[in-house]
Image: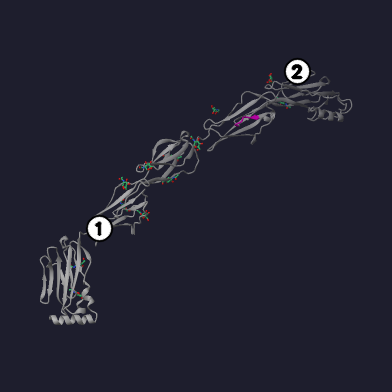
């Protein structure tokens, strides 16, 4: 194409408004690429729009002068020194690809393209060849952070030039709040103030990037915390158990690393360590307030559990009743019975007499703890079986005692006929209420007769047997004696006997009885005497 034709084409294009394309550069600005990789300078022109390019030339610009990269003319392409083999030109659009980039490739590149229509297009581009991103590593300035105490600074380091950084917490970007989670202005350092246990468990990733990016290995940091939420578990609280029981207490606490657990009794440390405390065959001395204490060697924090009160109680055995000594005499003696257990301590004592509750009265007084009572004076109705029940939280035991009250003799009664014929049988029986049983003696008109038994017999009565018979009842323990009189009338045979009440009630004491009987008595009959 000669100059004339070219000018006329320019005029022609200008007339239809195509001349703008000649002014605008086909490429401008800057582009980054990475050492060892390739870059393509993308032009904004396409030969189809303007016909074929006659020449395309790319030059690397240096102050000392341009260095040709590639020159393309219809008969072929010529690559400059150092570009052959790693450079490729697309002759349909002028785009240039440079591979195996080195730092020395950084710089400005110009392009000049002339079409077969005589139009010329130029452009200039800056290439920055960057070191690639590699070895992205997160380091922490604290290796064993303690929750709430530690401020952890994570630093991201990477190989490469012109790097930027960003952080991921798991899969989501780390959000810096400026107070607790802080990113340095260059994003290289992530600082967590007063770190929480879950802050760095993410895992955390750091990505360093320029035109490429590389991401660190997942990073997590175990933050020590606790102990907290300490629980002491026992079967119950309080626990009241029989001596010899096996007791197990468990303790747990949340802590990282796991807390060491130690046990204490009444505030004093026990040698026992670990989550389970076993008291085998526990004795009373092991009673008290138990708690467990958790210690985290990393956080240096202690935490004590609530206490569990354990009470060990010996079972009661060998209950017995003491205080019964000598003979008890109604109306004259007092007695003080005590109940105790040979082993174990009763917390409750209950007394019964003849299976019914034994209650206080003006004669019966209990001690405050019910362990004893006094009867003063004893009476005959106090005789009976006494039971004492001792109880504590884990057992009970019983003791029995039979108490005999000596009394009498009283109500001395003689039974027998009051009138008989000569040669009849006279048989008198004497009875008295007495404990122990009374011994008896008989007197006739004031003189001892017969045997010391409760009966007195005359087989063949004579007139001389008429008179007063006296029964003398004696109690050897009470030392008391009591008498009763009985009159017998012996009558000649053939003479009718007076109406006689021959029953046991005759002389059965009680003045009332005698008076009532007297009213029924026939006139002339003498009154009986009942003595005591
Ligand atoms: C240039 O790099 C891209 C991606 O890095 C690759 O796909 C392409 O094959 C490379 N081209 C040349 C000519 O090396
Ligand atoms: C050159 O560029 C054109 C248009 O963009 C494209 O169609 C063609 O494939 C490219 N040729 C080569 C060898 O890359
Ligand atoms: C770690 O870095 C933070 C922030 O700079 C600092 O407050 C903290 O004291 C450092 N910790 C240690 C153990 O150096
Ligand atoms: C990471 O995510 C966890 C869970 O959402 C959150 O608890 C933690 O605070 C986060 N860490 C940071 C450094 O933001
Ligand atoms: C990170 O977490 C994983 C699983 O959660 C665990 O196996 C690994 O030991 C942790 N690494 C560190 C340094 O804590
Ligand atoms: C204590 O822990 C053991 C084992 O975990 C369990 O078998 C036992 O029932 C626990 N005892 C109590 C009192 O919680
Ligand atoms: C208590 O444990 C011991 C063994 O440690 C066992 O011999 C004994 O029978 C247990 N006692 C009770 C009351 O379970
Ligand atoms: C156990 O604790 C209870 C209630 O806290 C207290 O009254 C008692 O005195 C304690 N016992 C001992 C032996 O410290
Ligand atoms: C944590 O902080 C508290 C108070 O700020 C301090 O008493 C404690 O010793 C610290 N713990 C550690 C492990 O540094
Ligand atoms: C009754 O108990 C007491 C005290 O516990 C004891 O000394 C005594 O030997 C016991 N007597 C009998 C008969 O068991
Ligand atoms: C009278 O008493 C004696 C001695 O106790 C006894 O052997 C005898 O059988 C009694 N006689 C009558 C009739 O009860
Ligand atoms: C009855 O008690 C009195 C005084 O207490 C005493 O002198 C008397 O000997 C007692 N009588 C008997 C039978 O024990």
Position in image of residue 316 (x %, y %) = 53, 34
**Does 3 sit above or below residue 128?**
below
Position in image of residue 463 (x %, y %) = 84, 21
Residue 478 occupies which quadrant of the picture? top right
Residue 276 in view: yes
**Does 58 sit above or below residue 455?**
below
Q: Which numbered mark, 2 or 1, is in the foreground of this view?
A: 1
Q: Quadrant of the C terminus?
A: top right
Residue 430 in view: no
Mark 2 secondary-structure assignment? strand
**Does the closest atom of ligand 11 sit within 8 Å of the Cβ of label 2?**
no
Q: Residues within 10 Å of mark 2 (few under 14, many from 20)?
A: some
- State left or right for residue 246 relative to residue 185: right
State the residue in front, 13 or 51: 13
Q: Residues within 10 Å of mark 1 (few under 14, many from 20)?
A: many
Q: Which residue is mark 1?
A: 163
Asked if the stretch drawn in magenta spans residue 366, the answer is yes
- State left or right for residue 411 relative to residue 143: right
Q: Which residue is mark 2?
A: 448
Magenta-highlighted stretch: main secondary structure?
loop
Q: CA distance from mark 2 to mark 1?
A: 143 Å
Position in image of residue 387 (x %, y %) = 61, 33
Which residue shows up at 41% across the image and 36% down it?
270
- Residue 278 — which label? none
Write the start and end of the magenta stretch as one range.
365-369
* Mark positioned earlier in the residue sequence (2 or 1): 1
Q: Quadrant of the N terminus?
A: bottom left
State the residue in front, 444 or 355: 355
Residue 33 occupies which quadrant of the picture? bottom left
Residue 51 occupies which quadrant of the picture? bottom left
């Amino acid at each position: 194409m000669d100059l004339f034709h070219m000018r006329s084409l320019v005029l022609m294009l200008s007339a239809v408004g195509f001349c703008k394309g000649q002014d605008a550069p086909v490429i401008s600005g800057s582009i980054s690429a990475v050492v060892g990789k390739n870059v393509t300078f993308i032009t904004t022109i396409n030969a189809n729009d303007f016909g074929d390019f006659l020449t395309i030339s790319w030059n690397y610009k240096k102050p000392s002068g341009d260095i040709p990269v590639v020159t393309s003319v219809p008969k072929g392409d010529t690559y400059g020194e150092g570009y052959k083999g790693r450079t490729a030109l697309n002759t349909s659009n002028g785009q240039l690809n440079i591979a195996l980039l080195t730092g020395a490739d950084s710089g400005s590149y110009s392009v000049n393209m002339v079409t077969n229509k005589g139009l010329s297009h130029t452009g200039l581009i800056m290439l920055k060849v960057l070191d690639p991103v590699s070895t992205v590593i997160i380091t922490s300035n604290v290796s064993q952070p303690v929750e709430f105490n530690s401020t952890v600074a994570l630093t991201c380091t990477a190989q490469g030039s012109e790097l930027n950084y960003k952080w991921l917490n798991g899969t989501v970007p780390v959000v810096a709040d400026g107070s607790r989670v802080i990113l340095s202005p260059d994003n290289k350092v992530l600082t967590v103030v007063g770190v929480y246990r879950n802050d760095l468990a993410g895992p955390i990733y750091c990505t360093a990037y320029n035109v490429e990016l590389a991401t660190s290995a997942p990073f997590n940091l175990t933050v020590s915390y606790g102990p907290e939420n300490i629980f002491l578990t026992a079967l119950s609280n309080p626990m009241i158990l029989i001596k010899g029981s096996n007791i197990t207490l468990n303790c747990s606490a949340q802590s990282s690393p796991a807390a060491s657990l130690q046990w204490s009794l009444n505030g004093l440390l026990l040698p026992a360590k670990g989550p389970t405390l076993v008291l085998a065959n526990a004795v009373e001395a092991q009673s008290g307030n138990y708690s467990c204490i958790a210690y985290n060697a990393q956080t240096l924090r202690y935490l004590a559990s609530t206490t569990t009160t354990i009470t060990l109680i010996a079972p009661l055995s060998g209950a017995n009743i003491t205080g019964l000594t000598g003979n008890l005499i109604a109306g004259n003696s007092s007695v003080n019975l005590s109940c105790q257990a040979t082993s174990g301590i009763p917390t409750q004592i209950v007394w019964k007499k003849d299976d019914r509750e034994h209650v206080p009265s003006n004669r019966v007084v209990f001690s405050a703890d019910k362990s004893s009572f006094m009867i003063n004076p004893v009476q005959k109705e106090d005789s009976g079986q006494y039971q004492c029940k001792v109880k504590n939280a884990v057992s009970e035991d019983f003791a029995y005692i039979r108490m005999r009250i000596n009394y009498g003799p009283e109500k001395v009664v003689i039974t027998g006929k009051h009138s008989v014929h000569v040669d009849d049988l006279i048989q008198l029986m004497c009875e008295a209420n007495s404990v122990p049983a009374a011994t008896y003696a008989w007197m006739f008109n004031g003189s001892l007769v017969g045997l010391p038994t409760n009966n007195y017999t005359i087989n063949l009565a004579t007139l001389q047997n008429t008179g007063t018979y006296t029964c003398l009842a004696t109690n050897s323990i009470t030392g008391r004696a009591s008498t009763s009189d009985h009159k017998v009338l012996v009558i000649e045979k053939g003479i009718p006997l007076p109406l006689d009440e021959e029953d046991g009630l005759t002389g059965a004491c009680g003045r009332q009885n005698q008076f009532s009987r007297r009213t029924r008595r026939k006139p002339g009959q003498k009154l009986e005497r009942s003595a005591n």
